[in-house]
Image (cartoon, coloured by chain):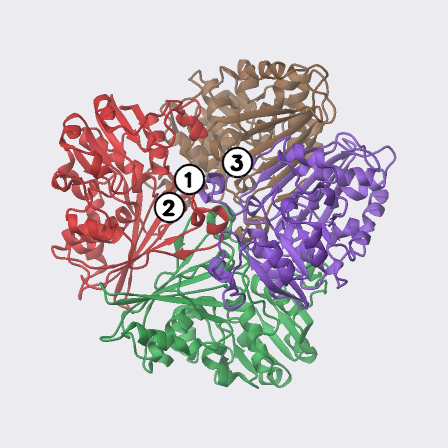
Chain colours: A purple, B green, C red, D brown
Amino acid sequence: MIKAAILGATGYAGAELMRILSSHPEASIVYPASHSYAGKKFSDIYPGMRGICDMVLREDDISAAADAADVIFLSLPAGLASSLVTPEILSKSVVIDLGADFRLHDRSVYEEWYHTEHHSPELLEEAVYGLPEIHRSELKGRRLIANPGCYTTCSILTLFPLLKNGLIGKNGIIIDAKSGTSGAGRSEKLSSLFCEVNESIKPYGVATHRHTPEIEQELSLAAGESIVLQFTPHLVPMNRGILSVCYAHLEDGVTESDVAEAYSMYSGEPFVRIIEGLPETRFVKGTNLADISYRIDKRTGNIIAMGAIDNLVKGAAGQAVQNMNAVFGLDETEGLVMGAGCPL
Amino acid sequence: MIKAAILGATGYAGAELMRILSSHPEASIVYPASHSYAGKKFSDIYPGMRGICDMVLREDDISAAADAADVIFLSLPAGLASSLVTPEILSKSVVIDLGADFRLHDRSVYEEWYHTEHHSPELLEEAVYGLPEIHRSELKGRRLIANPGCYTTCSILTLFPLLKNGLIGKNGIIIDAKSGTSGAGRSEKLSSLFCEVNESIKPYGVATHRHTPEIEQELSLAAGESIVLQFTPHLVPMNRGILSVCYAHLEDGVTESDVAEAYSMYSGEPFVRIIEGLPETRFVKGTNLADISYRIDKRTGNIIAMGAIDNLVKGAAGQAVQNMNAVFGLDETEGLVMGAGCPL
Amino acid sequence: MIKAAILGATGYAGAELMRILSSHPEASIVYPASHSYAGKKFSDIYPGMRGICDMVLREDDISAAADAADVIFLSLPAGLASSLVTPEILSKSVVIDLGADFRLHDRSVYEEWYHTEHHSPELLEEAVYGLPEIHRSELKGRRLIANPGCYTTCSILTLFPLLKNGLIGKNGIIIDAKSGTSGAGRSEKLSSLFCEVNESIKPYGVATHRHTPEIEQELSLAAGESIVLQFTPHLVPMNRGILSVCYAHLEDGVTESDVAEAYSMYSGEPFVRIIEGLPETRFVKGTNLADISYRIDKRTGNIIAMGAIDNLVKGAAGQAVQNMNAVFGLDETEGLVMGAGCPL
Amino acid sequence: MIKAAILGATGYAGAELMRILSSHPEASIVYPASHSYAGKKFSDIYPGMRGICDMVLREDDISAAADAADVIFLSLPAGLASSLVTPEILSKSVVIDLGADFRLHDRSVYEEWYHTEHHSPELLEEAVYGLPEIHRSELKGRRLIANPGCYTTCSILTLFPLLKNGLIGKNGIIIDAKSGTSGAGRSEKLSSLFCEVNESIKPYGVATHRHTPEIEQELSLAAGESIVLQFTPHLVPMNRGILSVCYAHLEDGVTESDVAEAYSMYSGEPFVRIIEGLPETRFVKGTNLADISYRIDKRTGNIIAMGAIDNLVKGAAGQAVQNMNAVFGLDETEGLVMGAGCPL
């Protein structure tokens, strides 16, 4: 059994991780921690887990976690992980960070978009960007995994094959993305109140959202050159789900079958479904799946590529477990529910 | 492996059953059927199940189902099951009926509340009312199981201990229940449209709802005498969940600890949680759990007993699988997810 | 024109009052105030009102308000109004308090349920309980109006005719009420977050909710003797609306037409509709209307009386304006929109 | 008083029109009609209007309507209006068509996108595209008004100033639009059921939605040359609202103040608000307002222009009344509520 620690276990992503790990056949939680609720039972904070996980929450102490666990999941505010992770910690435990601190290879890009100092730039090289569909070969046996963001997972998976195969123009890419409200986290702020979110949709972070450089980094890798793109997130009145609708200009002569062939890179993937219909977030809700589809518009010469995931699962906790499975040599699907209930 | 057939696989309860059985370690679906969608793939109707269950739907042919399967689940409109089930069918397969046809022991009560003839009254005696927490001892090896309704499961579990132990008055019981919209089914009717349900709450079926006699039957059993009660259902703008808030007058001298002791009848139950806080449907969403709590009001002399379940799981498909497990001698929890994600 | 001040203008009830008064033909806002947002424009806090009400918010200074205005609306936390209102203030302005401080005639009942001292018990006698359908004759020319609560308005209007006419038993009355989330206010608390409210229903304040004594006070008045009843509120995932479902035992010999006659007390009321169907909160959303209906159940001998209002309008701001209209001798409907859009 | 007829009064747009006209100070409904509900009271179909509009619905007879009314509003399925409107009808009544039949000047474009024959192409020249902010000068005294679509109103208002002033590239414009569910109408279809819409977001009509040529027609007018653009609509789990997020490349040298100046074309408009913050549909819900904002992204060279309206008001019934006001020489704001309640 893999012994797991979770720091930040009572945020929405951390709690989803607790739930998934509670029924994982090859892992067990040994150190659940929460700065806000240390000393309380996890199931007092998440009563849905009463009887399933009644463990008492510990302090967010990474050293104690490293002593106790084979793998430490971090689900912490930006900037905190980079000050906690050290070579010594990594010598004891694998660290899978659900936050942003180790996702961007370039420290200056991180500091520019996050407006904060990076506390352990020397570890950036060791970190693997944990999107198994793209970086699987780098995962096995690694010690520091940067678990991708929710918008980014969805957007990168959707666009990667097109750029990798040179099917679309590298300029002018636009990603119009939509998120359920759990993406805003569990903190007590006015803009997250039911009556401020319900019955409305809004864009936010226009031209400034922090997931932009992360998407650009990975798509630049696909394209083999630097990609600059437009990314716009929206808040949708639902609990979960990310929908990324991506617009790009098809290169001359590219055919429908070229596109289909590009997406066939996912044909062996357990968690990616290339679908004929259009994606709807409800069809991946509660699962680690990504549904991807596309349409070519001959009038405009554009391709519209669309992806959907559950932001707390494939966009956070589920992918973190998929990464753990990969790092420890398990089947990547272990412990990850497959089909989506509907309605859920 | 238990071979399972499902007739009515594309209604919400049937589809949830398909989902649960798809990942059940001891059962496999051999005959999925749908009158409306025969010939199509299940995952074309429920795209959330693409790649997980792509079986082609058959016609709702109970004979063919009985030839193929060890257990047949029926999720059909009222009145249909009683015309399909015969001794011959039962000699080949266990039948678990998610509908109402075999729930009421008294044919005349059925015909009065359902305004339709019962087509196989001779089978009523063979049927077991499939609420394992109450009728477990009768389940093993039986051939015809009447799976309880959603409101009824929740209401009976909540009130049973109080009546069984004579703690409350037998007159004047009131059940004010609330349901998510999936309880109204998947048929295309005006009253189920998003814009007719969203941002509103309404009572319906006041004094006339068909789950009333079913609740009365089981609570009369608990009380040892005939119970007549008030039951009022409501429609709530959410996908899933049943909340039953039950009001009764405490008998003289009954103490808090008498009540606690009565509810201790559930102490070994895997799916019933007696909780200190008040139940919320989200804490059982997607699970087969029932959360039950109560408050005694000294001002009024009343007890307010409250229960919450997921109408499609403990109120339908999950309980059906729990019944299958019990009938076939498996652990009742087999294949049934335990903790509730939150938010889900 | 009536000059109006509003203290607490940026809570949900206060803001609704701002909106209604902004288009009131006989009133104008002269002193909008908010402790939290003093110095900001109202429309910066409520952007829906940009261009319609861009007034700068003042401090919550009741003396300044009294100097400027003919009527002061108070929408403040419990306990604050009773420390602000004085005979001097009342000599300058009419005060309409949307809070609870002047609703209960008996100071000790207030202090027991609100766990706080009442700061101006000498004014309790001067206060009128501002439910115009019941206390209209007392309103005209009065200086201190206690605007009823949301649950209470709905519950009292629904049950008053039955008790006034002695049609139901005075013991055993049960009110099972449901509220939209705006009833929980605009403060930043975990339990009001979208992801904590959405897709769930829950009871709260069981046997302890503060609206209980207020309902009992007014229904005791109707009954001519002291009424003790059971009141249970619930939180519903929708922005607005109150539904009160009230259970009582009909007295022997009471007929359907006795009940109809009792409810005919509302026949001239502009804001009460006795309807044949069952109430749904959406049909009164955004209006000052109360929809009331009832069913008699011969099996149980009960009457189920049901009422629906919009908690922010008839349950707060709309009723406050109705009271202002009555006090100042205007038509009670002035400035109050009538029909409900659907879907809204 | 302007006498008004409404054909198709019980769809969502028709019903909203009924509500607005019921309180319009200069108009009265004389002929409310509904094919589906002829003979019933309007308030039986829309109980929110009980006591406010209890008129009996007539058959959808345009001749009878023309005899009775000064203005006929048509809210009918595509293709029906063009077969009903004749010069004779127009000689008796002004016709304001909320459908698509008279919006496109080019019959062949209509027939290509709507896959149906146009039954009165000779009237296309007489029709005015009823977007008052753009075509006000053509409205007064006209007999046939094509009321714009919901997505189109929002998208055109948002982009018009940029194209009119040559500030953006004419190629590569992308409109990613989102709509509340009332936009799908009141017909009983599976995809509009609560449980199929709730807790999900989906794109639909990608590259094929019928509002595309309507947007292109008006923006081509603005640009002075033919515009081809990408339009993608989405379904959002909320009752009302349209959000159009529009992407375009800024022409070289265009400054923030050029853009501000372009949008100043709306400075005298009663229903358009150029806002500093980002639009949210809740801030225009229930009103005839359009909120518009923009951001310039120096990294990409793009402008992101965003608009929000209520699809049933500015996107349908409210704009129809605004058009009626304009045609009959009234103040355009007559009868149209201004500020948005929040939460609503």
Horizontal side of A316 relative to A331 (left or right) equals left
Q: Earlier in the sequence, mark 1 or mark 3?
A: 1
Answer yes or no: is residue C59 visible.
yes
Element assignment for label 1: loop
Question: Measured from the top left, where is residue D102 in percent x and y?
Answer: 60, 26
Marks 2 and 3 sit apart, C-alpha to C-alpha, by 25 Å
The dot on residue B205 is: none
Circle nearer the viewer, 1 or 3: 3
Q: Which residue is mark 2?
A: C184
A297 horizontally vs D120: left or right: right
Q: Amino acid at mark 3?
A: Gly
Kindly identify which numbered label has been placed on residue D57: 1
Q: Secondary structure at mark 3?
A: loop
Q: Read off the chain for label 3.
A: D
- The chain holding disc 1 is D
Instruction: Name the amino acid type tagged 2.
Output: Ala
Q: Position of residue D189 (x, y in %)?
A: 57, 50
Q: Which residue is mark 3?
A: D241
